[in-house]
Image (cartoon, grey):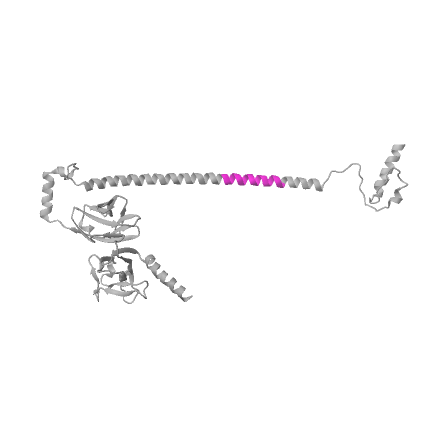
């Protein structure tokens, strides 16, 4: 019994981390990863820490913003202006897998758990990864992030703590976002995310999501100098045709492809919604037909049942109240023996086993005598 219980407990420990974690991140052995954790404004001066474990009683400190800020392969930093503290883990091994938590320490109260992460470390290629977690673009320009994936599921680009873009295109906090699914020369499946019209307020952490796996990516926007803005305005004034689409080899094909993909995506979503509406209408129609059939069958059954009950009542009435015979006279029955009746009639030869009414025999005898006269 004990060995079976031990195996069951081990199985639960292997399954539960995967179920309990809020975000699942996969990293290759020997690689590194940075986790972002956002906190509220009233927690700026609180200590933040990173711990590993399933519950409060077994979640052991790894690093803290007071001490130690680094421990072995793990370090922590706190940006109070952005209200984000980050944890970086390097040179990962299979022993580093498991549940981790971002926590804000509350003196004299219960600590606040901000986010759960489940980290899996694989010796082969991760199911979802990016080549760089830090990507920089110029203000007013665009930036491209390539997410390599091997798993399946819904694909989204989300801002940390904000909205998401799915499908082929959309807008996110004032910038245009396009998602394109392709394969590179090494037959790796790639989700290419392009952010256009960058602004300074777009500096933040984002999540590339495919199925249940996610990968954090930080977007940095470099501010243009006055000289760069003046040069760009001059270039636009001298060559206004550069803002229009061109079929020359020097034109950027990415923007055109993204627009086409966005239109196709919208058409596909509209078509899918139309199919869903048709399926819903067909299902409702079938439900109405089935319901009507059930009602008709029920009414016919009730009608048949009522008719049968009425016929049975009529038959019972006939049996209980038979029609009276004019030739029969009823009276109180007095048992007589047939020997007393032999002198009254010659033609009637009653059976020994029949009981006669004396009044009935008298009436019959009188009727016969009257007939003979």
Q: Is residue 301 magenta?
A: yes
Residue at the (10%, 47%) spot, across then down: 228
Magenta range is 293-309
Q: The N terminus appears in which quarter of the rendering?
A: bottom left
Residue 129 position within the rendered picture, expressed as x and y whole percent measured from the top left: 24, 52
Q: How many marks?
A: 0
In this rendering, is residue 59 above or below 259? below
Observer-nearest of 24 and 5: 5
Secondary structure of the magenta portion, mostly? helix
Q: Is residue 289 magenta?
A: no
Residue 180 visible within the image: no
Image quadrant in which you'd find residue 18: bottom left
Residue 341 visible within the image: yes
In this rendering, is residue 289 above or below 203? above
Q: The C terminus appears in which quarter of the rendering?
A: top right
Residue at the (10%, 41%) spot, across then down: 235
Observer-nearest of 238 and 253: 253
């Amino acid at each position: 019994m004990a060995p079976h219980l031990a195996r069951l407990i081990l199985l639960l420990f292997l399954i539960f981390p995967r179920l309990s974690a809020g975000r699942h991140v996969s990293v290759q052995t020997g690689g590194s990863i940075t986790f972002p954790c956002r906190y509220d404004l009233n927690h700026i001066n609180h200590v933040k820490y990173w711990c590993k474990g399933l519950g409060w009683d077994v979640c052991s400190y790894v690093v803290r913003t007071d001490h130690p800020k680094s421990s072995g392969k793990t370090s922590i930093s706190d940006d109070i202006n952005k209200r984000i503290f980050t944890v970086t883990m390097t040179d990962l091994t299979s022993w580093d897998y498991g549940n981790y938590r971002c926590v804000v320490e509350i003196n004299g109260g219960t600590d606040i758990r901000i986010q759960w992460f489940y980290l899996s470390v694989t010796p082969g290629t991760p199911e979802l990864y990016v080549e760089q977690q830090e990507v920089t673009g110029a203000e007013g320009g665009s930036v491209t992030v390539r997410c390599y994936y091997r798993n399946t599921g819904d694909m989204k680009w989300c801002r940390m703590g904000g909205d998401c873009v799915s499908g082929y295109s959309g807008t996110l906090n004032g910038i245009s976002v396009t998602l394109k699914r392709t394969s590179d020369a090494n037959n790796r499946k790639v989700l290419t995310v392009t952010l256009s019209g960058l602004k300074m307020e777009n500096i933040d952490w984002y999540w590339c999501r495919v199925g249940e796996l996610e990968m954090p990516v930080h977007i940095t926007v470099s501010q243009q100098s006055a000289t760069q803005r003046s040069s760009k305005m001059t270039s636009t004034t001298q060559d206004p045709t550069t803002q229009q689409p061109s079929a020359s080899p020097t034109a950027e094909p990415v923007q055109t492809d993204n627009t086409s993909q966005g239109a196709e995506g919208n058409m596909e979503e509209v078509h899918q919604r139309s199919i869903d509406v048709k399926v819903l209408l067909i299902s409702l129609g079938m439900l109405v037909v089935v319901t009507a059939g059930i009602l008709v069958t029920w009414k016919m059954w009730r009608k048949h049942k009522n008719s049968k009950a009425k016929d049975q009542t009529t038959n019972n009435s006939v049996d209980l109240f038979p029609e009276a015979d004019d030739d029969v006279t009823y009276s109180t029955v007095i048992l007589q023996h047939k020997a007393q009746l032999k002198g009254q009639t010659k033609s009637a030869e009653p059976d020994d086993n029949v009981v006669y009414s004396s009044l009935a025999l008298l009436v019959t005898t009188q009727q016969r005598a009257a007939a003979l006269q």
